[in-house]
Each structure stands twice: as C-alpha cells, then as structure tokens.
Amino acid sequence: MLHRRLYTEHHPVRYLITYLISIVVAFELSHLFWEYFNGGVLSHYLLNRSGFPSISNGWGIVILPLLAWFSTSRIKKRITFPPDYVFIAPQNTQWNFN
C-alpha cells in the first residue's frame, strides 16, 4: 500500500492540478480587482428579481478554485493507475453507429 501511495503522490498529474488551481485563483483575483477599481464588485439577484437576495461576484474566489480542484481530482482519479495495473481490452466489440 505504501508503494501505491508514493506513486500517486509523485504523479505528474498532481503538479498539473496545482498549476491549474493557481491559474484559476490568479484569473479570479485579477477579475475581482478589475471590478473593484472600475465601479465595485457586482452582485446578481436570484432569478433577476430585486426582492430576492443578491450573490456577489466575490464568491467566485471560493467557488471557482473548489470547482477546479473537484474536477481535476475526478480526472486524476480516472487516469491514475497503480504501477501493476494491466489494461485488457474487451474482445469482440461491435461498434454500432447507426
């Protein structure tokens, strides 16, 4: 089990996840700074009705990195295999594109 853990910790996909989340944070921070210095951070009303609560664009600094982490973690889980994994292609597969 230790061998498998070390394999997944040093996998190149892990570095891509870190870079992607860093890029998302940098873009969102630059977006919020631009909004702040050009009239203020916008808010959007639920269902576009002023009687409902508004949601600030500032929540993007929390939501977008979480979404990037979640999606890249799911991708990593699907493409990371242990070193002793053997892929066996299915035999007699019929492709129907009708």
Image (cartoon, rainbow, N blue to C red):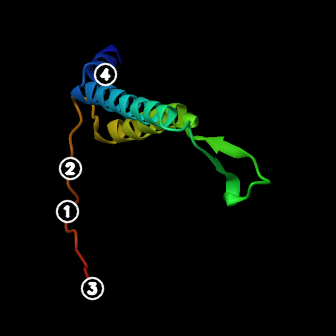
For the residues bearing labels 3 and 1, Cβ distance under 8 angstroms: no
Q: Residues within 10 Å of mark 4 (few under 14, many from 20)?
A: few
Disc 4, SS: helix
Q: Residue at x 33, y 31 (%)?
A: 23
The foreground one among 68 and 9 is 68
For the residues bearing labels 1 and 4, Cβ distance under 8 angstroms: no
> Between disc 2 and disc 4, whose residue precedes?
4
The foreground one among 67 and 32 is 32
Q: Which residue is mark 4?
A: 4
Disc 4 marks a residue whose amino acid type is Arg
Question: Where is residue 40 drawn, in percent x and y?
Answer: 56, 36
Report the quarter where the C terminus lies: bottom left
Frontmost of labels 1 and 4 is 4
Q: Residue at x 24, y 25 (%)?
A: 11
Disc 2, SS: loop
> Between disc 3 and disc 1, whose residue precedes?
1
Q: Which residue is mark 3?
A: 98
Quadrant of the image occupied by residue 7: top left
Question: Where is residue 97 drawn, in percent x and y?
Answer: 25, 80
